[in-house]
Amino acid sequence: MSRTVRTITATVAALLLATACNSAATSNSPDSKGSSVRGVTDDAIKVGGIVSMTTASGYSKKDTDLGARARFARADAEGGINGRKIDYLGAEDDGQDPAKNLAAARKLVQQDKVFAISPMSSVTFSGADFLQKQKVPTFGWGTIPSFCGPTYIYGFGGCMVPMPGGTISQTWPEGLKQVTHGAKGKTVAILANDNDAGTFAIRTYKQSFASAGYKVTFAKSSVPATSVPSDWSAYTKEILRSDGGRAPDIVVSVMQTPYNIGLFTAVKRSGYRGVLTDPTDYDPGLLAKSATKEALDGVHILLTFEPFETRSAAMKQFKADIKKASGGKDVPLNMHMMTGYMSADLFLSIAQKAGRNLTVASFQKAANGFSDTGTMVGDRALPKGQKESFGCGALVQLKNGAYRVSSPFKCYEPIPFK
């Protein structure tokens, strides 16, 4: 188990120990149709999700659930998976709270008896050890260490934050080279939240940007994760003097939208004219508020999937599926929808390969050696994706109230993570 996962689960260890005995006894009890496989009947596969729909900062990933519903609905409309429909229960809200995340995982497995969890979208994944022990195939965005290594947990774009011995995707710094006209002589400052995810992000991106040829002048996970600062001056002062008393060429934020708005607004007010970038703010819904639109104007946003602005057949299908799941309405697209959609898509693709005799063992056998090409996250391959990312992505820039592609979707060679 990684140090990060151990740290998170320590807060709920007593709860886990109290339930460990009876959980193993109930995980594979027969259902009403006599199946001995948890969550699988003759005509259905039961799936649930865990999503941070509410958070203390106001940030929400609720549309992750919509994305999953859209993809599962299409699978059912096309006849299901080897004759079985997907009984999607919807997503539990963990409130981005470790105890609630574990409680949601236990409920879905022990009470609802799901075969798989897809999507799991939260920076808090304290239920990871429980799901691994219970052999529950789990799918989400592999941006936290829990998606890197465990045999039953899968990132839809692969492992984005590998452990030592793995690799790091170079999509972000390599994509930025098109924005900064190369990395030679360019400096970078990286800021993240003061939590396990932030600490890990700093460690990862310091290596990533340095390997791409940038000089990292500042890299700290120092912003409180529990509340958005009202005064950013202490952070901006350090950042804007980090290059020998001068401002860096690029300011990288590895934080969520409310934090990015505060940080970028403060940086801009200082007169900063360099590049601002984050991996979060690709959400047309943000453009509805003029203050938000102004704060994020000019920011380059990392995507690990095809931008909505592309015209591929897969993107057209995605948009049609989301519209149908939204009752025929044209809703603003966002990256959370893509997280749910592609998490569901990877699960469905493996389940299809597993065949009619669906068990956890047959599912895992299908996953081991699974591969396909040309998806909206690039070429997928397992078990490679449980150790490294699929290495593909793009950058979009918010400019004058609209997103435009600033670095096209492309796959890059990863680097060793030390």
Image (tube, helix red, strand yellow):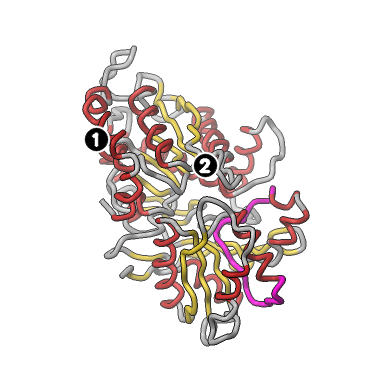
Q: Mark 2 is on which residue type?
A: Tyr
Residue 237 vertical placement versus 72 (above, below)? below
**Residue under the point 47% across and 45% down:** 122
Residue 211 image-quadrant placement: bottom left
Asked if residue 68 lies in the magenta stretch, the reply is no
Q: Position of residue 38 (x, y in %)?
A: 31, 25
The percent position of residue 318, horizontal first and vertical second, equals 59, 43
Left/right placement of residue 81 relative to residue 55 reads: left
Q: Position of residue 343 (x, y in %)?
A: 46, 43
Instruction: Identify the amino acid type marked 1.
Output: Ala
Query: In this view of the protein, can residue 362 be seen by the observer?
Result: no
Q: Which residue is mark 1?
A: 361
Which badge, 1 or 2, is on the more N-terminal residue?
A: 2
Q: Secondary structure at mark 1?
A: helix
- The residue lying toward the viewer, choosing from 28 and 223, is 223
Region in magenta: 269-285
